[in-house]
Image (tube, helix red, strand yellow):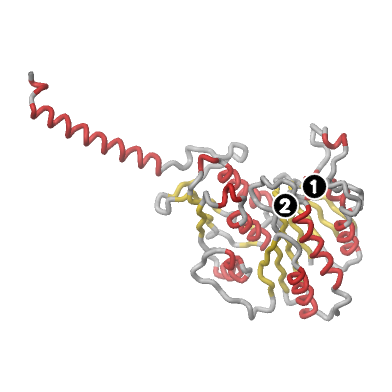
Amino acid sequence: MLKKHFRYQLWLKRRNEKNLVRRTREKYYKKSKLTKQHIYNKNLKSTLFYNTARHSFTFQAPSVFSFLYNKDETINFFEKIINFISDKRNYRKNLFIDTAGIIRFTTDALMYLLAVISNLNEKFADKYYFSGNDPLDNSVRLKFRESGFCNFVKHRNKIDIRRNTEKIQIVTGDDCDTEVARQLTDFIRLKGTLDHSTTRFLYAMIIELMSNTHKHAYNRDDMILPRWYCYAEYDGNDIISFTFMDTGVGIPASVRKKFFEKIDFLGLKSESSYIVSALNGEFRTETGKPFRGKGLPKIKDICMQQKIKRLRIISNNADVCIEKGGVKQLKNKSLLRGTLYTWD
């Protein structure tokens, strides 16, 4: 009889309402504090940190943010982002790129960051929200902005360096751009004593690299769309450094494999050897067309003639350095999705 009393029924109703509020609150806090418990990339054994204040997952860039000087850590940083994005369970999530701890960087890493955050396949482009911060180090932060990175993202404090004649800011495209190639050759003549005929080789070289981005774009289902990024900087000592990033399939993936290379289960054949083979002029183009595959041998000849110095190519699991003394294959454990060219 007591259970049917209206006061008991009222107390029971209020208790159930309180328990519902308590369970909802606990469920919310448990979900918001989900950080180290979940491993999104089992191969890298890495955990992602969820920032409850920003309501975003934080990806911390390495202190040396560079494919040239800290290759493995930098590639692993991007692999965490790419693996997170490729998981459909993470759709509509916020990603925060934390660059505050960077004390040294090279522009190649910034180019790839731009490719990831602004050049995703349309399947992924509208499903994620990116934000970030600036490096805390004043000199690094200034170089960060002078590179032209802020021209591609929303930034509160954009810096206009059009009067800075020591750098050509990051430029990008998805096919040949003769205007950019001409701008780069003019930059060399402006800073040095070379004439038009002497710098003609650079124009042809840049056009070849641009065209490779489009020609080697076989798989349109790739997460990052094929595109090129280019940057040039004068150091004040008669040296101009060039960086060219190609986000296509990469040279090893576009090389035609021989039968025993295709069945190399033990991994005895390094991907660097495919680049060396292509540089030496062996008919390796995957397209099978006889007029293709001649660009890399020409670029190697340019380097061997000392028209450019310290040409380095990083692509997929390959890392090759070309100097006057010959071609060196460097060790590379990490996979870079695309191709990076640097030279002086």
In the image shown, does 145 or 295 lie closer to the viewer?
295
Residue at the spot of label 2: 248
Q: CB of mark 1 within 8 Å of CB of mark 2?
A: yes
The residue located at (76%, 61%) in the rendering is: 210
The residue located at (83%, 64%) in the rendering is: 205
In the image shown, does 231 or 68 lie closer to the viewer?
231
- Callout 2: SS: loop
**Residue type marked 2:** Gly
The picture places residue 86, in percent across and down from the top left corner, at 58, 43
Where is the C terminus found, in terms of image quarters?
bottom right
The picture places residue 166, in percent across and down from the top left corner, at 69, 76
Side of 127 where 312 appears, left or right = right
For the residue carrying disc 2, how many other residues have a C-alpha within 10 Å: few (<14), some (14-19), or many (20+)?
many
The residue located at (67%, 46%) in the rendering is: 222
Of all residues, the one furthest to the top in this rendering is 1
Residue at the spot of label 1: 254
**Residue type marked 1:** Ser
